[in-house]
Image: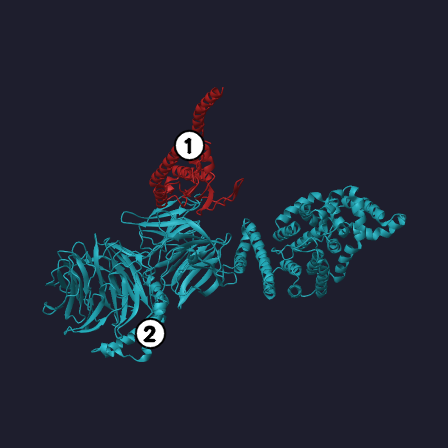
Chain colours: A cyan, B red
């Protein structure tokens, strides 16, 4: 039997504390020095039902549906359970009662008092008999299950057995320390009878518990343990009779297997307080609840399978006369129990899952609606009762009825007042409301347009729903509707244009916001909760053994299921704690173990956050009230030591970041992976919000950037660690080939040829898949890449920072880069269905014109308009700091050139065409002079003509231009990026590399200067572009 | 530096508020503030918080240290230590004064907080006075006082250097006379 002791928790003020279980074992009832009794749904219950019974409460006992409480007014008072209403006084004493026991049949209540007497009360007749004989206050009493004898212990140091027939003392043991008052008595000497037939009585005797046979009062056996050094105060048989528990005055609790006289469990109180009371859970024999003198409650939970216990019970019954003689059980069982003992010693806190189930199901016990069908399928499971998202339980006097992004609804139901307060976060939406809660509303929901309240059925009045409109324009401020007889509202939801209510007969009713009735739907199972936002309704309900959900879209014309009825994931043994929508409208849930999940558009649920992991304290919880995908955080309230926030002082909302539960989350790799996938997960929502709300544009860009950055970092990390295959895997996950290109570049810088080859293959496949043609351009793509490697070999001497940390630590010596860019360019053009021939053309002017560049660069310096930009080029090449500035300038302007220059022939084209004519005209000029003349001529002839002419339809020219000049056309983002990088490259390369196209660029750019600004603005709104430009900048900084 | 200036500096400290309006990010020289989302806490400088609070546009969330339990602890420590202890905030006095003056309704048990803060202040000021006393009496060249807040320094700054100057002058007044005496002697 492996056991674990749950941490002690406060339940009463310091002093004698008593504990008992309800008959079904679901509730623990405690009484304490503060005069309260508390009803706990298991140890985890943070909101025990509390009732003040007097100045001090000394003892509690439970039987049937009655709770017996002994208080300082020297009476034993009966209370109904669970209502905790007074149900008559059982008996009167002249001093407080110290222990109450009830016979198994519930007919007799036996109380021991400080006035040295014991009373036996007949419940049916209200007769009572008094036993007197003790010469000091009674400490404890116990009754023989066969009602033949009664045992009592007293401060006079004796334990007496009384015959219930003759009311005479039949036997006395003097084994207790003497004292003069119950208050100072440490050792209570509480005895216990063998449960089924009372054949034996267990009597604590100093550090051991002795077992005496009934009638003969012979000592049969003694239970002891080497670890017990202090006197045992309480002995208690388990309900099955298989185990005997004993607790000492210094907080040790020992459990013995009575057949084997073996200690199967030993636990110590962390602070060694005296144990004042102990009780076995009647429903499952593994659990003991106990209280200490400091008013704390604890439980010990053992991993006893119930079947095993039942067997044992049978066994015991069969061998009733002499269960003790059965000591030699078969060896197997012995061996097993030895193992169990070992495990109990080594791992005292494992194996608790079984009882967790219990503690959770206990919580939902108020679920009395008729769920017969599901009860039949799972007789042991209690279904979660319906709830409103972000509300606290309705038995509290001050509670939250709803807390969402619109506002807060609080309910105050004390004896003086019964009201509902509605407060809006945004005071400009509506002023705060205070409504009198005459109807005793328990459900509430809030939207920007209305406050919806609903109450259950009462004696005469049916279940009713009231809707208070916030911005009505016709003067009718509220409407209400009564549900048909027998139908009770269990969950409600309020959206902007409609409201929904789910009822106990599994109807889901819709109303318009002003109260017109709409559809009535049938739900497949008992409702758990509803959540609404704009036009969506999330319905969670029981189905089979788990929860299911559906997402409905409530439109003007009708209701439609966006996600059909589907199971909803929950953590093991967890219940649903919150359901709602993120600000962006994605459905999400939180379960009772704190896992937040969102419904991805691909219709599966993703765990996005473990709120419990963020708590410091063990019993702390986050009360979730909302989720923002934009800011990637969860809005919640930290509840210290409870599940629900207090109403006063007003709790503060905290925002905790989302974090997908990845493996090894502390490592750098997992951190990046987590960021990557988290951003992916929320990207869709942010993207779709972009269309509605412009403020999301920035977030979208940020998300895109994050995805790219994390991808590159992950890739770089994999590369650095030499995990090339993983690097390739990462590449495969990346949808955008543009970033893959950067990755290829990085890999090639690192000299990972094999990887680069595979990546380019992969790129091929991707683009093949995308376009389904263009094989030619691809075949060209790869060689050009390879080409870059050869070149790289040559310049390897130059680079020394290639193993730099940063993935973009590329170098100025960028011959390789240039080629990649060419390749990239290739690829980018290819989707535009350009014929291969034109691509061929594209490269040619680049090389051919090298000569021309030389001349023009020199001659054009003073050549008028071109100076401004043309003159900068050499500067940029030499100084990398100015380069950056220049680069941005070019970047902003360059794409523009394409648009306008396409209207007229570019210089190289023109020069090509006119070269021979010019040569004829100026035969004596060398090539340099010739080109300068040509440029002048070009300006005179072509540009002036162009500027004079109206812009025409330029589409044919455009494509032509984009292939013939390297500036390309600003057709898409990728193009822009390539350009920027390309231009940057061209600038960094030495002057001899400067090409005519760049001149044509500058020229046309100059012409269209006013337009450039506009273009720049466009660029800034272009996320991919800005990212690339930053990359480029970064490159050059290095 | 007078107390108004100290207060001005302290007003730059950030404090959490829960606004009841929506507004986008405000770009200030000292940094961006916001966005303001109704019902959700946001950090703003105290001066803005006070202004919004006065217009009933927000609820102020008291700083983490501004509760009775923590301050009692600080007070106890301050009493027990011989030297100055570190205060929870560099401008604890000013912050508390400002926030308690405008947002008493947002801070639970504000009267108690006020009392404890006053106690802490008194303890520290008496420590400061006694150390000043000590430095003058022992003719020490320098004294080192850690964890003094700006307000506390400024409470003594207008007086102490001046007083020390005066003392020095007095001592010097005796000095030259001796010197002249010695000169007389040599003459």
The label nearer to you, 1 versus 2, is 1
| Rendering quarter of residue A955 | bottom right
Q: Position of residue A76 (x, y in %)?
A: 17, 58
Q: Position of residue A945 (x, y in %)?
A: 79, 45
Q: Position of residue B40 (x, y in %)?
A: 45, 48
Q: Please tell me how crowded label 1 is: few (under 14), some (14-19), or many (20+) other residues with Cα within 10 Å.
A: few
Q: Chain of mark 2?
A: A
Mark linked to residue A1032: none
Q: Work out whether residue A787 or residue A382 is closer to the camera in this orientation and state it.
A: A787
Q: Chain of mark 1?
A: B
Horizontal side, residue A263 vs residue A892: left or right: left
Q: Position of residue A542 (x, y in %)?
A: 39, 65
Mark linked to residue B139: 1
Q: CA distance from mark 1 to mark 2?
A: 78 Å
Say if residue A459 shows up in the picture: no
Q: Secondary structure at mark 1?
A: loop
Mark linked to residue A338: 2
């Amino acid at each position: 039997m492996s056991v674990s002791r749950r941490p002690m928790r406060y339940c009463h003020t310091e002093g004698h504390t008593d504990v008992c279980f309800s008959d079904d074992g679901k509730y623990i009832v405690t009484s304490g020095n503060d005069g309260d009794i508390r009803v706990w749904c298991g140890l985890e219950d943070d909101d025990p039902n509390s009732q003040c019974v007097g100045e001090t409460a000394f003892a509690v006992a439970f039987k049937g549906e009655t709770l017996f409480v002994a208080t300082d007014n020297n009476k034993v008072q009966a209370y109904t359970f669970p209502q905790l209403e007074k149900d008559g006084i059982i008996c009167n004493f002249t001093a407080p009662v110290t222990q109450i026991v009830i016979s198994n049949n519930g007919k007799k209540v036996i109380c021991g008092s400080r006035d040295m007497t014991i009373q036996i009360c007949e419940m049916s007749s209200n007769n009572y008999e008094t036993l007197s004989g003790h010469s000091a206050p009674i400490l404890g009493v116990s009754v023989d299950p066969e009602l033949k004898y009664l045992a009592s212990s007293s401060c006079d140091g004796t334990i007496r057995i009384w015959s219930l027939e003759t009311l005479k003392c039949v036997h006395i043991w003097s084994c207790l320390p003497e004292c003069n008052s119950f208050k100072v008595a440490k050792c209570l000497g509480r005895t216990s009878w063998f449960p089924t037939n009372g054949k034996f009585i267990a009597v604590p005797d100093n550090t051991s518990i002795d077992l005496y046979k009934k009638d003969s009062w012979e000592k049969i056996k003694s239970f002891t343990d080497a670890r017990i050094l202090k006197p045992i105060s309480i002995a208690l048989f388990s309900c099955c009779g298989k185990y005997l528990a004993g607790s000492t005055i210094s907080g040790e609790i020992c459990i013995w297997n009575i057949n084997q006289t073996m200690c199967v469990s030993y636990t110590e109180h962390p602070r060694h307080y005296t144990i004042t009371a102990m009780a076995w859970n009647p429903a499952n024999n593994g659990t003991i609840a106990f209280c200490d003198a400091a008013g704390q409650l604890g439980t010990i939970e053992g991993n006893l399978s119930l079947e095993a216990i039942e067997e044992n019970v049978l066994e015991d019954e069969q061998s009733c006369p002499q269960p003790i003689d059965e000591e030699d059980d078969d060896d197997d069982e012995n061996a097993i129990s030895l193992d169990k003992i070992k495990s109990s010693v080594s791992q005292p806190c494992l194996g608790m899952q079984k009882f967790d189930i219990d503690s959770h199901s206990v919580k939902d016990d108020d679920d009395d609606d008729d769920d017969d069908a599901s009860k039949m399928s799972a007789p042991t499971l209690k279904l979660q009762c319906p709830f409103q998202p972000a509300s606290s339980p309705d038995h509290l006097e001050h509670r939250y009825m709803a807390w969402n992004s619109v506002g807060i609804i609080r309910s105050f139901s004390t004896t003086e007042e019964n009201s509902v307060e509605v407060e809006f976060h945004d005071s400009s939406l509506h002023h705060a409301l205070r409504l009198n809660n005459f109807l005793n509303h328990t459900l509430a929901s809030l939207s920007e347009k209305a406050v919806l309240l609903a109450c259950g059925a009462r004696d005469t009045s049916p279940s009713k729903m009231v809707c208070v409109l916030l911005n009505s324009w016709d003067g009718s401020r509220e409407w209400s509707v009564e549900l048909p007889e027998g139908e009770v509202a269990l969950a409600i939801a309020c959206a902007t244009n409609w409201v929904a209510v789910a009822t106990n007969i599994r109807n889901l009713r819709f109303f318009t916001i002003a109260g017109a009735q709409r559809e009535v739907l049938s739900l497949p199972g008992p409702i758990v909760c509803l959540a609404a936002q704009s036009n969506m309704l999330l319905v969670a309900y029981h189905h089979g053994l788990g929860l299911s959900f559906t997402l409905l879209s409530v439109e003007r014309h009708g209701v439609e299921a966006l996600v059909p009825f589907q199971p909803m994931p929950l953590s093991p043994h967890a219940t649903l704690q919150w359901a709602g929508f993120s600000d962006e409208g994605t459905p999400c849930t939180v379960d009772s173990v704190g896992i937040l999940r969102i419904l991805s558009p691909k219709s599966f649920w993703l765990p996005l956050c473990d709120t419990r992991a963020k708590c410091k304290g063990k019993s702390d919880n986050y009360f979730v009230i909302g989720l923002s995908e934009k800011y990637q955080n969860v809005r919640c309230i930290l509840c210290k030591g409870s599940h629900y926030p207090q109403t006063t002082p007003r709790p503060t909302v905290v925002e905790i970041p989302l974090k997908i539960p990845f493996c090894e989350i502390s490592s750098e790799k997992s951190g990046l992976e987590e960021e990557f996938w988290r951003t992916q997960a929320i990207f869709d929502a942010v993207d779709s919000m972009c269309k509605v709300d412009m403020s999301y544009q920035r977030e979208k860009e940020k998300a895109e950037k994050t995805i790219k950055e994390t991808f590159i970092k992950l890739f770089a990390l994999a590369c650095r660690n030499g995990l090339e295959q993983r690097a390739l895997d990462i590449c495969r996950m990346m949808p955008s080939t543009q970033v893959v290109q950067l990755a290829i570049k990085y890999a090639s810088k690192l000299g990972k040829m094999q990887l680069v080859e595979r990546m380019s293959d992969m790129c091929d496949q991707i683009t093949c898949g995308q376009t389904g043609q263009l094989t030619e351009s691809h075949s060209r793509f790869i060689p050009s890449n390879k080409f870059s490697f050869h070149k790289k070999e040559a310049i390897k001497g130059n680079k020394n920072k290639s193993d730099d940390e940063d993935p973009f630590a590329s170098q100025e010596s960028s011959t390789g880069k240039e080629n990649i860019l060419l390749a990239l360019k290739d690829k980018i053009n290819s989707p535009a269905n350009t014929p291969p021939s034109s691509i061929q053309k594209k490269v040619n002017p680049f090389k051919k014109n090298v000569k021309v560049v030389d001349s023009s660069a020199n001659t054009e310096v003073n050549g008028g308009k071109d100076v401004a930009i043309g003159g900068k080029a050499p500067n940029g090449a030499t100084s990398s700091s100015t380069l950056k500035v220049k680069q941005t300038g070019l970047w902003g302007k360059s794409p523009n050139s394409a648009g306008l220059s396409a209207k007229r022939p570019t210089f190289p084209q023109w020069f090509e065409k006119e070269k021979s004519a010019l040569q004829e005209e100026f035969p004596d000029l060398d090539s340099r002079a010739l080109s300068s003349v040509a440029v002048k001529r070009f300006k005179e002839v072509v540009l002036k003509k162009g500027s004079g002419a109206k812009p025409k339809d330029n589409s044919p020219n455009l494509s032509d231009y984009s292939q013939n000049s390297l500036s390309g056309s600003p057709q898409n983002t990728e193009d822009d990026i390539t350009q920027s990088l390309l231009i940057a490259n061209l600038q960094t390369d030495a002057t001899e590399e400067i090409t005519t196209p760049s001149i044509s660029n500058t020229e046309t750019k100059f012409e269209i200067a006013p337009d450039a600004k506009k273009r720049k603005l466009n660029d800034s709104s272009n996320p991919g572009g800005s990212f690339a430009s930053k990359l480029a900048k970064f490159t050059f900084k290095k | 530096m007078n107390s108004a200036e100290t207060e001005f500096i302290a007003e730059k400290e950030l404090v959490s508020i829960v606004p009841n309006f929506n507004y986008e990010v405000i770009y200030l020289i000292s940094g961006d503030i916001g966005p303001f989302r109704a019902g959700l806490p946001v950090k703003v400088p105290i001066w803005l918080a006070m202004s919004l609070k006065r217009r009933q546009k927000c609820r102020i969330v008291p700083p983490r240290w501004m509760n009775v339990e923590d301050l009692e602890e600080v007070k106890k420590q301050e009493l027990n230590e011989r030297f100055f202890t570190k205060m929870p905030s560099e401008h604890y006095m000013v912050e508390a004064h400002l926030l308690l003056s405008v947002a008493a309704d947002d801070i639970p048990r504000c009267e108690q907080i006020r009392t404890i803060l006053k106690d802490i202040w008194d303890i520290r000021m008496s420590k400061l006075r006694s150390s000043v006393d000590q430095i003058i009496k022992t003719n020490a060249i320098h004294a080192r006082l850690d964890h003094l807040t700006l307000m506390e320094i400024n409470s003594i700054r207008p007086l102490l250097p001046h007083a020390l100057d005066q003392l020095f002058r007095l001592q010097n007044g005796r000095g030259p006379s001796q010197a002249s005496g010695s000169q007389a002697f040599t003459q």
